[in-house]
Amino acid sequence: MLPLLPHAFAELSEDFHTRQNWEGFDNPFVVTENSDLKNELGINNLGDQQLLNIFNGTEKIKSLKPLSMVYSGHQFGQYVEQLGDGRGLLLGQMSSNSGLIDIHLKGAGKTPYSRFGDGRAVLRSVIREYLCGEAMHALSIPTSRALMIIGSDEMVIREKSESAAMLARTAKTHIRFGSFEYFHYNNQPENVKALADFCIDQYPAYFSSTPAAYEDFFRVIVERTASMIARWQACGFNHGVMNTDNMSILGETFDYGPYGFMEDYLPSYVCNHSDHQGRYAFKNQPYIGLWNCSALGHALSSLISEEAQGEILQTYEEIFQSTLAELFRKKLGLEQEESEDAALIQGLLDIMESEKLDYTNTFRNLTQALTNKITPELDSDIAKSWIVSFQERHTKEGLSVDKKLISMHQVNPKFILRNYMAQEAIDAAEDSDFSKLETLIVVLTKPFEELEEHQKFANKSPAWAKDLEISCSS
Ligand code: AMP
Ligand code: MG
């Protein structure tokens, strides 16, 4: 039996959610299940069919109180007054090594918040979400993760007809910035307070020993958001839809849609083809993170004075900058902080941009510059002069090169999820061949290892992939 408990959120009043059951598939099957996550949750005694039966609703857990959550949010800068789980249900919560964890089912059928949607998710998008959760987790970036993908013979219409699927996912929370915005803009300050109290009570991250509990709550959110986005920037991740309804209050990356890992370094990279203005471009992510935090601050204005909000929001930039600087230092194999670090890293980024170098591979191959080998990416004159300053900086630190090589390879991945890789796995899965998906999972969960047999996944994308367009439809 799955030790899944009713979620504490179900005890909040009906203003916060709608309790309901879900619609499983008639002919469900397991596309993949996450044995690593099952281990972490202590449920590897459960076979995949047992889990499938539970998540498909074939086997009922009577005590559960599944629910769809209401929220609103700013989408591309515009306030949208009612969103909510239009196709997802919070099934319950489980205890894990890192505390309580939400179990959510995406693609579970219609809810009162479905608007014009069909309540389903497509196999393509749940595979993308599954893969990215595993990739991000392996890169030590806080993220939701999926436990299982359930396939079906049900077809749904997007740009074309596609197979429907469900994703059972875990996250520390499903409360979003937009959850607070909903109550604020509906003029329900008592519910803003009730939700903040719920969070403070439920999540140890918000434990506060000062009388300013709401300020401390907001401070933690700002801190975690800044630090999460610094981690995105360090590995070239572009989220694509940083609407406030896709921002977790515990700073986990979630609601994966048209995301992309940048390949050639291009600060103006936009992974989402529906984002015509480039609002969520790679280089804008840090500002949008702050914009979203201020939108949340505004929604909390019945609890936190404007002055206190302003003071807390000011910490964002410092946390973001210092986290990113530290991550970049590690990527360069540097242990000490020096005033010239920012110029050194910017010098490298400038070369990557002007010479259209692959972000991941350039960092990965930097170790070769330390051992005086030819670095495939950095062979122009300007790059060679950068290498000289890079080597000088290392000589100053005087640590053993061998140790540095190891530590640099532990932070600069060899493998990231290039869009074409996900696409190949999706195309095969549409034809009931899940072997490519399984191979990718192996590669993405060991991004720092050499895995010579999978070398091709470390190469730049093939030419055909240049035309791959990733839209919002999912
Ligand atoms: P997303 O783009 O997945 O973050 O979703 C934005 C909003 O649209 C959320 O409120 C979703 O629940 C809702 N939504 C997206 N797709 C569907 C669908 N197929 N059926 C119902 N609601 C949906
Ligand atoms: Mg969303």
Image: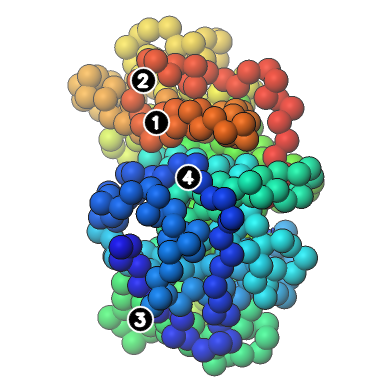
Tell me if label 4 and label 1 are in contact, CB under 8 Å.
Answer: no
Tell me if label 2 and label 1 are in contact, CB under 8 Å.
Answer: yes
Query: Which residue is labeled 2 in the image?
Result: 451
- Helix or strand or loop: what does disc 3 sit on? helix
Location of the N terminus (image quadrant): bottom left
Task: Decide which of tag 3 and tag 2 comes sooner along the chain.
Answer: 3
- Find the distance from the CA under tag 2 to the CA under tag 1: 10 Å
Query: Which residue is labeled 3 in the image?
Result: 201
Residue appearing at x 59%, y 29% in the figure: 428
Task: Decide which of tag 2 and tag 4 comes sooner along the chain.
Answer: 4
Residue with the most extreme bottom position: 190
Measured as percent of width and height from the top left, residue 376 is found at 49, 11
Checking the image for residue 34, the label placed there is: none
- Find the distance from the CA under tag 3 to the CA under tag 1: 38 Å
- Find the distance from the CA under tag 2 to the CA under tag 4: 27 Å
Q: Between residue 65 and residue 350, name the one nearer to us.
A: 65
Residue appearing at x 60%, y 76% in the figure: 70
- Helix or strand or loop: what does disc 1 sit on? helix
Q: In which quarter of the image is ligand 1?
A: bottom right
Query: Which residue is labeled 1 in the image?
Result: 442
Decide if ligand 1 comes within 8 Å of the CB at mark 2: no
Q: How crowded is mark 3: few (under 14 residues within 10 Å), some or many (20 or more)?
A: few
State which mark lies toward you, 3 or 2.
2
Tell me if label 4 and label 3 are in contact, CB under 8 Å.
Answer: no
One can see residue 354 in this view: yes
Measured as percent of width and height from the top left, residue 410 is found at 32, 31
Checking the image for residue 30, the label placed there is: 4
What amino acid is labelled 3 in the image? Asp
What amino acid is labelled 1 in the image? Val
Residue appearing at x 62%, y 35% in the figure: 430
